[in-house]
C-alpha cells in the first residue's frame, strides 16, 4: 500500500491559540513577513498541499502545487475546478493513500495548512507540526489552532497526540513572533 513519505503541518496562532477571528477570518494582525517566508519555504519543499475550502496558502508558487481540498461536497474524489492540479477530497469516502494515488503522488511529502478541522484530521500521523505564535495578538471567540486544543496548548504535544517540542526559532524579534517545530519522537 502506498503511504505518504512525510506529513507536515503549518499554522500561526494568536497568544490565545486561535488561527482566525470570531468571524472565521485570518486578521492582518496575525500576518508577519518572517512567518510568511518560513511558510513559503516549507511549502516549496512539499509535493502535495492539503486544506479546506477557506485555507488556500496564496503564495507565488501555489499554481505549481498538487493539492487536496477537503470537503463534504463530493462523495469521494473529484477534480477541483477552482485550482489547477487539485482534487476535492472527502476523507469519509476515500483514504489519504487513495487520494494521493489519484493525484499521482502516492509517496508524497504532504503539507497540511488548515483550517482547524483539517489540521485535526492528521493529529496522530504528523511527522512535524510547525507552530508559530504571535504573543501580542488576542482573538477571543476565534477558531482554535486545533480543535479541543485552544489556549497555550494549541498544536502541541500537550494535546496528547505524541508530538514533542523540538527546534525553536525567533521569527520576528521586535514583535516576539516565535516558532516551535513539534516532532514525533
Ligand atoms: N493562522 C493560520 O495558520 C491559518 C491556517 C489555516 C486557515 N486559517 C484561516 O482560518 C479560516 C478558515 O478556517 P476553517 O476552519 O473554516 O477552514 P477551512 O479550511 O475552510 O476548513 C473547513 C472546511 O473543510 C471541510 N471539512 C472540514 N471537516 C471535514 C470533514 N471531516 N470531512 C470533509 N470535509 C471537511 C468543509 O468543507 P465543505 O464546507 O466544502 O464541506 C469545511 O467547510 C480562514 O480565515 C483562514 O485564512 C488560518
Image (cartoon, grey):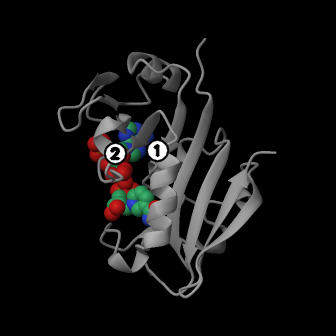
- Up the image or down, 73 lies above or below 22; here it is above
- Up the image or down, 82 lies above or below 34; here it is above
Q: Residue at x 28, y 40 (%)?
A: 63
**Residue that lies at the very extreme toward the right in this rendered image:** 185
Q: Is residue 144 visible?
A: no
Where is residue 6? Give x, y as percent: 62, 34
Instruction: Categorize mark 2 by other alpha carbons within 10 Å: few (<14), some (14-19), many (20+).
Output: few
Q: Residue at x 56, y 22 (%)?
A: 107
**Residue that lies at the very extreme toward the left in this rendered image:** 81
Instruction: Categorize mark 1 by other alpha carbons within 10 Å: few (<14), some (14-19), many (20+).
Output: some
* Count of residue discs: 2
Query: For the residues marked 1 and 2, what is the alpha-carbon distance in whole angstroms?
Result: 7 Å
Q: Secondary structure at mark 2?
A: loop
Picture quadrant where residue 167 is located: bottom right
Where is residue 171? Give x, y as percent: 58, 73
Where is residue 101? Give x, y as percent: 45, 17
Q: Where, quadrant-wise, is the C terminus in this rendering?
A: top right
What residue is disc 2 on? 61
Q: Residue at x 64, y 42 (%)?
A: 126
**In the figure, is residue 108 to the left or right of 76?**
right
Q: Secondary structure at mark 1?
A: loop
Q: Could you tell me if the residues under marks 1 and 2 are in contact, i.e. CB atoms within 8 Å?
A: yes
Q: Residue at x 74, y 54 (%)?
A: 160
**In the figure, is residue 56 to the left or right of 150?**
left
Residue 44: which numbered mark, if any?
A: 1
Label 1 vs 2, first from the N-terminus? 1
For the residue pair 48 and 77, the one nearer the viewer reads as 48
Q: Where, quadrant-wise, is the N terminus in this rendering?
A: top right
**In the figure, is residue 146 to the left or right of 90?**
right
Amino acid at each position: 500500500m502506498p503511504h505518504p513519505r512525510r506529513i507536515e503541518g503549518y499554522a500561526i496562532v494568536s497568544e490565545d491559540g486561535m488561527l482566525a477571528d470570531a468571524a472565521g477570518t485570518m486578521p492582518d494582525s496575525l500576518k508577519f513577513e518572517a512567518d510568511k517566508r518560513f511558510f513559503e519555504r516549507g511549502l516549496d519543499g512539499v509535493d502535495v498541499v492539503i486544506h479546506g475550502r477557506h485555507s488556500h496558502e496564496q503564495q507565488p508558487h501555489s499554481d505549481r502545487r498538487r493539492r487536496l481540498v477537503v470537503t463534504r461536497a463530493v462523495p469521494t474524489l473529484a477534480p477541483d475546478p477552482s485550482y489547477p492540479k487539485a482534487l476535492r477530497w472527502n476523507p469519509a469516502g476515500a483514504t489519504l493513500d487513495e487520494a494521493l494515488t489519484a493525484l499521482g503522488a502516492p509517496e508524497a511529502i504532504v503539507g497540511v495548512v488548515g483550517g482547524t478541522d483539517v489540521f485535526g484530521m492528521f493529529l496522530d500521523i504528523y511527522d512535524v507540526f510547525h507552530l508559530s505564535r504571535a504573543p501580542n495578538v488576542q482573538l477571543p471567540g476565534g477558531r482554535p489552532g486545533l480543535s479541543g486544543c485552544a489556549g497555550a496548548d494549541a498544536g502541541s504535544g500537550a494535546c496528547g497526540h505524541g508530538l514533542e517540542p523540538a527546534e525553536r526559532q525567533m521569527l520576528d524579534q521586535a514583535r516576539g513572533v516565535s516558532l516551535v517545530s513539534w516532532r514525533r519522537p
